[in-house]
């Protein structure tokens, strides 16, 4: 009997190709877990600041900064940066050497190296005039879906003191990242360790992050409403000093006016805002900021001009 129902033979049925799972992304660095939320909040401003940036070549650039404030003496900073030829992303170039020196001779310097395709190293030095204050060495390994970091701070073999920090982040799904931080410190007569667990969930328009440990908790929530409006909420609790802070910040971009407005309000009765205005075709950016602490009855404002 023929196939009166017009059904195709079993062998002629199309076969569904097996679904390919996308590889899990690298979670990035532990220090950047709360970066999206923190970038929403305005930076503190006080006094008058002039910044002049100069690009000397495709690898080298310098910046001169003059800062005058009623809270202290006028200061000058010379900032220099060198970037190599190996560019992994728009924000990552190796090797990179960055230095900042003020008028008193104090120096802050960083050196970033790419030792292998997945292995990175960083060295940080800080001096107070002719005295070393901080020296720190970092090693970071980035796998396909995890990141492991080890940091040594102020190692002193003679004085038997050191600070070691270990970070680990693992991507469990396309959106969920879990990990932890272990801080170990040792000096004569004192030794201790602090463990902190961390988690991050990234959706299409929002990111939620939480750090919980014996030293306290740090939670943040970032939401991008549209291309112009971003908001952030941050909660920090410190069990040692028995202090808790809740902050709300917002970021407003007005592309037609070349303006960016950032504002904040927190549980310490502090409000603040910073307005940035670009002046095309001139390479000049103006910034005006004001911050008021109602609880301590303190007010300070700032104005800055950036050229280049």
Image (cartoon, rainbow, N blue to C red):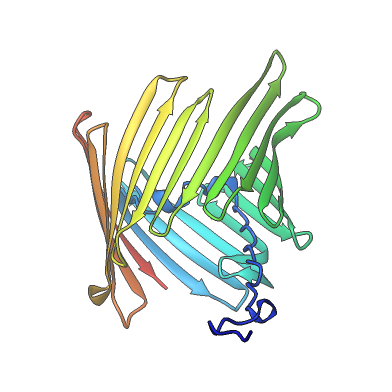
Inspect this view and state whether residue 128 appears.
no
Please say if 84 is above or below 70. Answer: below
Which residue extends farthest top?
189
Q: Is residue 116 left or right of residue 133?
A: right
In terms of image quadrants, where is residue 116?
bottom right
Foreground of the two, 16 or 20: 16
Q: Is residue 202 left or right of residue 137?
A: left
Residue positioned 65% across, 46% down in the render: 125
Please say if 139 is above or below 216. Answer: below
Foreground of the two, 204 or 98: 204
Q: Position of residue 119 (x, y in %)?
A: 75, 56
Q: Position of residue 101 (x, y in %)?
A: 55, 53
Residue positioned 54% across, 67% down in the render: 62
Residue positioned 53% across, 82% down in the render: 5
Foreground of the two, 144 or 294: 144
Residue positioned 63% across, 78% down in the render: 13
Quarter of the image containing the N terminus? Answer: bottom right
Foreground of the two, 260 or 284: 260
Inspect this view and state whether residue 65 appears.
yes
Q: Is residue 172 left or right of residue 159?
A: left
Q: Position of residue 115 (x, y in %)?
A: 78, 59
Please say if 69 is above or below 155. Answer: below
Q: Position of residue 36 (x, y in %)?
A: 43, 53
């Amino acid at each position: 009997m023929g196939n009166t129902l017009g059904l195709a033979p079993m062998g002629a049925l199309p076969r569904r190709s097996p679904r390919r799972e996308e590889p899990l992304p690298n979670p990035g660095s532990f220090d950047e877990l709360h970066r999206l939320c923190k970038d929403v909040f305005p930076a503190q401003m006080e006094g008058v600041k002039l910044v002049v940036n100069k690009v000397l070549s495709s690898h080298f650039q310098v910046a001169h900064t003059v800062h005058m404030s009623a809270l202290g003496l006028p200061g000058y900073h010379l900032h220099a940066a060198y970037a190599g030829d190996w560019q992994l992303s728009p924000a990552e170039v190796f090797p990179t050497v960055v230095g900042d020196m003020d008028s008193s001779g104090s120096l802050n310097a960083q050196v970033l190296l790419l030792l292998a395709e997945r292995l990175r190293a960083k060295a940080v030095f800080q001096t107070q005039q002719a005295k070393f204050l901080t020296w720190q060495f970092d090693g970071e390994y980035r796998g396909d879906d995890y990141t492991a970091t080890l940091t040594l701070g102020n190692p002193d073999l003679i004085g038997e003191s050191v600070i070691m920090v270990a970070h680990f982040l693992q991507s469990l799904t396309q959106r969920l990242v879990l990990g932890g931080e272990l801080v170990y410190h040792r000096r004569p007569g004192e030794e201790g360790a602090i463990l902190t667990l961390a988690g991050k969930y990234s959706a299409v328009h929002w990111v939620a992050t939480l750090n919980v440990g014996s030293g306290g908790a740090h939670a943040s929530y970032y939401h991008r409403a549209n291309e112009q409006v971003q908001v952030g909420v941050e909660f920090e609790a410190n069990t040692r000093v028995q202090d808790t802070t809740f902050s709300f910040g917002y970021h407003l971009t007005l592309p037609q006016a070349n303006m960016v407005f950032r504002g904040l309000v927190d549980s310490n009765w502090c409000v603040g805002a910073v307005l940035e205005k670009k002046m095309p075709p001139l390479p000049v950016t103006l910034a005006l900021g004001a911050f008021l602490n109602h609880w301590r009855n303190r007010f300070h404002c700032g104005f800055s001009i950036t050229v280049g």
